């Protein structure tokens, strides 16, 4: 038995688009996606009767990514920076009724893309979405920890079973002769709606406690990201442009984020409140503004500590 203690994460297609086109896209594209984000798209495929196959790496390491493939070459998410997209697309194109374990050896061309040495043996599971129990996607949409057990007969997935992961669940993959077990557990995420030294310091501080972070200043992009947030997650809004920062704040208020912080002076807070009220958004009790515990913070690093500490306190109430 081998244990690999890295999360299996997936990417929601809309988020990929946001990261690919955002000012901070390349810097943050690996940091905020989770398996829960793909559930909405895959559930829609299942409801509409559209086939979707879900792929993730099981050897030599537990990947931090996964990929959903639809007929005609459609892809939701990304796995190993796309190094194995052709291989996995071909596996999904077989349109088998049960999942398969796919073996492969990393080529010289694939190596710099996936950051695995050439000649490394890799394995993937490619499983039709319809083979998962029907409740899988609703549980993932609720950000519930899950244990997903793939029963194996040689390279064929004979069944997929799921069970609750429990509050103390930690992401891992357990590979045995007749089964592959994936434990999926949510990781807190932080959207920083803005930019600058404080945003950078806040991202660094959140990374210290293993939060997944993305910096994104555009309201429409923030809205796309916020749509996938859960009560475990946080949004911090900053910036001197009332229109832009208020738009980001409105997106945060429409999300399920458990902590919403807003940086800025009292005058800025009032200006944002007026902007929101003009758009019939008047319930602002979830907004912590100015964001951060009152520790007389002055530098960007100190402000970041105050904000993360406040967010942690709110989440643990």
Image (cartoon, rainbow, N blue to C red):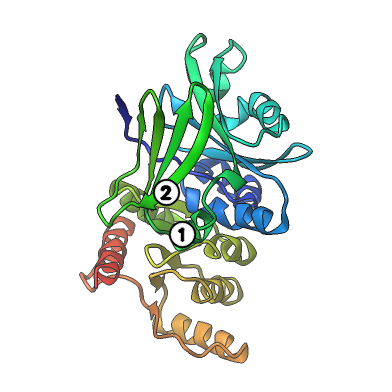
When asked about the image quadrant of residue 172, the answer is top left
Residue at image location 45% in from the left, 36% down from the top = 150
Camera-side mark, 2 or 1:
2
157 vs 292, nearest the viewer: 157
Whether residue 203 appears in this view of the structure is yes
Which residue appears at 50% of the width and 58% of the height?
135
Most foreground residue, 274 or 255 = 255
Residue 180 at x, y percent in the picture: 41, 32
Counting residues from the N terminus, which is met first, the one under dot 2 or under dot 1? 1
Q: Residues within 10 Å of mark 2 (few under 14, many from 20)?
A: some
- Position of residue 153 relative to residue 140, above or below, is above
Q: Is residue 220 left or right of residue 315?
A: right
> Residue 158: x, y in percent?
51, 34
Q: CA distance from mark 2 to mark 1?
A: 10 Å
Question: Residue 243, image x and y in percent?
Answer: 61, 76
Residue lying farthest to the right in this orientation: 72
Q: Secondary structure at mark 1?
A: helix
* In this rendering, position of residue 313 left or right of residue 106: left
Q: Residues within 10 Å of mark 1 (few under 14, many from 20)?
A: some
In the picture, the quarter occupied by the C terminus is: bottom left
Q: Residue furthest left?
A: 295
Which label sits on residue 4?
none
Q: Position of residue 76 (x, y in %)?
A: 64, 45
Check contact, mark 2 vs mark 1: CB within 8 A.
Answer: yes
In the depicted view, which residue is nearer to us: 89 or 209?
89
Residue drawn at (44%, 40%), measured in percent from left and top? 8
Q: Which residue is mark 1?
A: 139
Q: In the picture, residue 199 is in which quadrant?
A: bottom left
Residue at position x 30%, y 70% in the image:
292
Residue under pointer 2: 162
- Asked if 136 appears above or below 255 in the picture, the reply is above
């Amino acid at each position: 038995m081998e244990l690999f203690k890295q999360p299996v994460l997936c990417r929601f297609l809309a988020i990929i688009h946001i990261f690919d086109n955002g000012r901070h896209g390349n810097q943050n594209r690996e940091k905020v996606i989770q398996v829960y984000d793909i559930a909405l798209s895959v559930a829609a495929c299942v409801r509409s009767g559209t086939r979707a196959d879900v792929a993730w790496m099981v050897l030599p390491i537990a990947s931090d990514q996964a990929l959903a493939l639809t007929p005609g070459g459609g892809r939701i998410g990304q796995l190993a920076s796309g190094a194995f997209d052709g291989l996995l697309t071909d596996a999904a194109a077989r349109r088998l009724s049960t999942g398969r374990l796919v073996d492969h050896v990393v080529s010289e061309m694939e190596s710099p893309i996936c950051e695995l040495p050439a000649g490394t043996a890799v394995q993937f599971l490619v499983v039709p979405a319809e083979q998962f129990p029907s409740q899988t996607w609703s549980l993932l949409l609720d950000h519930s920890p899950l244990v997903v057990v793939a029963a194996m007969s040689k390279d064929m997935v004979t069944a997929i079973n799921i069970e609750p992961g429990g509050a103390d669940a930690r992401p891992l993959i357990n590979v045995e002769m007749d089964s592959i077990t994936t434990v999926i557990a949510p990781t807190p995420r932080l959207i920083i709606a803005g930019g600058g030294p404080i945003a950078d310091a806040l991202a660094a501080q959140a990374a210290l406690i293993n939060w997944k972070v993305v910096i994104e200043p555009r309201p429409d992009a923030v809205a796309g990201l916020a749509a996938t947030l859960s009560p475990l997650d946080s949004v911090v809004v900053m910036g001197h442009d009332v229109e832009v920062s208020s738009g980001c704040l409105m997106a945060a208020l429409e999300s399920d984020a458990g902590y919403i912080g807003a940086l800025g002076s009292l005058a800025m807070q009032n200006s944002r409140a007026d902007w929101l009220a003009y758009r019939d958004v008047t319930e602002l009790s979830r907004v912590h503004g100015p964001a951060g515990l009152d520790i007389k913070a002055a530098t960007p690093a100190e402000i970041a500590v105050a904000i993360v500490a406040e967010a942690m306190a709110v989440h643990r109430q």
